[in-house]
Image: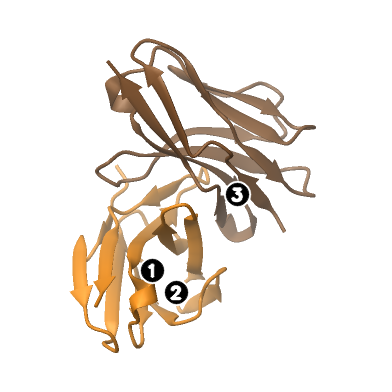
Chain colours: A brown, B orange
Amino acid sequence: AQTVTQSQPEMSVQEAETVTLSCTYDTSESDYYLFWYKQPPSRQMILVIRQEAYKQQNATENRFSVNFQKAAKSFSLKISDSQLGDAAMYFCAYRSWYDKLIFGTGTRLQVFP
Amino acid sequence: DVKVTQSSRYLVKRTGEKVFLECVQDMDHENMFWYRQDPGLGLRLIYFSYDVKMKEKGDIPEGYSVSREKKERFSLILESASTNQTSMYLCASVGMSYEQYFGPGTRLTVT
């Protein structure tokens, strides 16, 4: 069975600095999707970034980028030029069959001015 | 924009009551999901549905059932609510790019 592990329950960063959130996963599949979701204090979960395992190039969305290491089964999220609005819970997720998502336990990110 | 709505943001029920949580999506998505979110546990899948009248158990289906009579609507039912079902419940549907669109969540308190 697939599993997703986020080992950092909480992280903090100063505005304009860079922070990296860690995620590791376990699977025996060779082709899959990985996601980072953001849940601000208002609770609406939104997609931050998606990575397809067969693509070697790391995904990037504006200030958000990933470091995808397939052999190491690692999928970290880097947030550059952090903003106050980035403060949220961040969840790493693995897409399983029937589009089921397997989530990590989340990392709470605090951003200090 | 895809919209997923849930019937209530906050709900307080008594132990033993039957509870209905409703979720509606407006994008004709086939796959819909119910998750439960608890601190330190992340999101756990309760049930999902890949078509009308089709349902599959997720990781924690005990004490829950679901109904999907129309494509846009997916209901979660707590047959006899218990205090350990106090939680945040999130509904989601899946688009073509495998992105899951989430509703705002229902915070259920069972007293």
Residue B92 x %, y %: 40, 56
Q: Chain of mark 1?
A: B
Query: Please, what secondary structure does the residue beneath circle 3 have?
Result: strand
Query: Please, what secondary structure does the residue beneath circle 1 have?
Result: loop
* Res B71 label: 1
What is the C-alpha distance between the residues marked 3 and 2? 22 Å
Pick the residue in front: A97 or B27. A97
In the picture of the structure, the residue carrying the numbered disc 3 is A95
Residue B13 x %, y %: 21, 78
Residue B51 x %, y %: 49, 70
Q: Name the quadrant containing residue A37.
A: top left
What is the C-alpha distance between the residues marked 1 and 2? 5 Å
Q: Chain of mark 3?
A: A
Circle 2: residue type: Val
In the picture of the structure, the residue carrying the numbered disc 2 is B52
On-image quarter of the N terminus of chain A: bottom right
- Give the residue displayed 53% in from the left and 71% down from the top: B60
- Give the residue displayed 35% in from the left and 53% down from the top: B27
Residue B47 x %, y %: 49, 70
- Give the residue displayed 32% in from the left and 47% down from the top: B2
Circle 3: residue type: Arg
Q: Name the quadrant containing residue A74.
A: top right
Pick the residue in front: A49 or A98. A49
Q: Name which of mark 1 and mark 2 comes first in the sequence.
A: 2
Q: Is residue B97 above or below residue B37?
A: above
| Labels 1 and 2 touching (C-beta < 8 A) | yes
Circle 1: residue type: Lys
| Labels 1 and 3 touching (C-beta < 8 A) | no
Pick the residue in front: A80 or A30. A80
Query: Please, what secondary structure does the residue beneath circle 2 have?
Result: loop
